[in-house]
Amino acid sequence: MSVDHAEATADDGGQESLATEAAVRTYAVAPGVQLNVRSGPGTGYGILYTLPAGSRVPIFCQTSGTAVTGPYGTSKIWDNIDNGEFVSDAYVHTGTDGYVASRCAF
């Protein structure tokens, strides 16, 4: 799990400024699952690559798409894990059946 941290840096004037780096929360993919990453929020979109078992994914935003049944129930929620990369939330352990991130803006 990532932890927020701050780093003090000195600028040219000798004054210190505070630079913060926002932590991105990651979520575990269901145990033993090799998860397809798709180019859009649904099973009709092409598979870009497959995540290996034991992976964790960031969720930058979420959107509605094709209903999928997986280890964590049936869900129409799709998680955006990178620019143009989506996985079904039914395979990601978020601890809830609802949204855990903001809705994606397309």
Image (tube, helix red, strand yellow):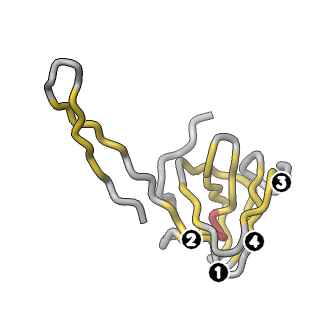
Which quadrant of the view contains residue 33? Answer: bottom right
Alpha carbons under labels 2 and 3: distance apart: 20 Å
Mark 1 and mark 3 lie on one chain; the one further toward the N terminus is 1
Query: Which residue is labeled 3 in the image?
Result: 47
Residue at coordinates 83% horizontally, 49% vertically from top-left? 45
Q: Amino acid at mark 1?
A: Pro
Measured Cα–Cα span from mark 3 to mark 4: 12 Å
Which residue is drawn at the image coordinates 28% and 37% (left, top)? 19
What residue sits 60% from the left and 68% below the top?
92
Q: Are marks 2 and 1 in contact (CB under 8 Å)?
A: yes
SS class, disc 1: loop
Q: Quadrant of the C terminus?
A: top right
* Residue that carries the numbered disc 1 in the rendered image: 31
Spatial separation of the CA atoms under disc 4 and disc 1: 9 Å
Element on which disc 2 rests: strand
First in residue order: circle 4 vs circle 2:
2
Are circles 1 and 3 on residues that touch, CB within 8 Å? no
The disc, 3 or 4, on the residue closer to the chain's N-terminal end is 4
Measured along the vertical axis of the image, is residue 43 above or below residue 105? below
Q: Quadrant of residue 47?
A: bottom right
User: Disc 4 versus disc 2: distance between alpha carbons?
Assistant: 12 Å
The residue beneath circle 2 is 28
In the rendered view, tell whether residue 12 sits above or below residue 46. above
Q: Position of residue 37 (x, y in %)?
A: 74, 56
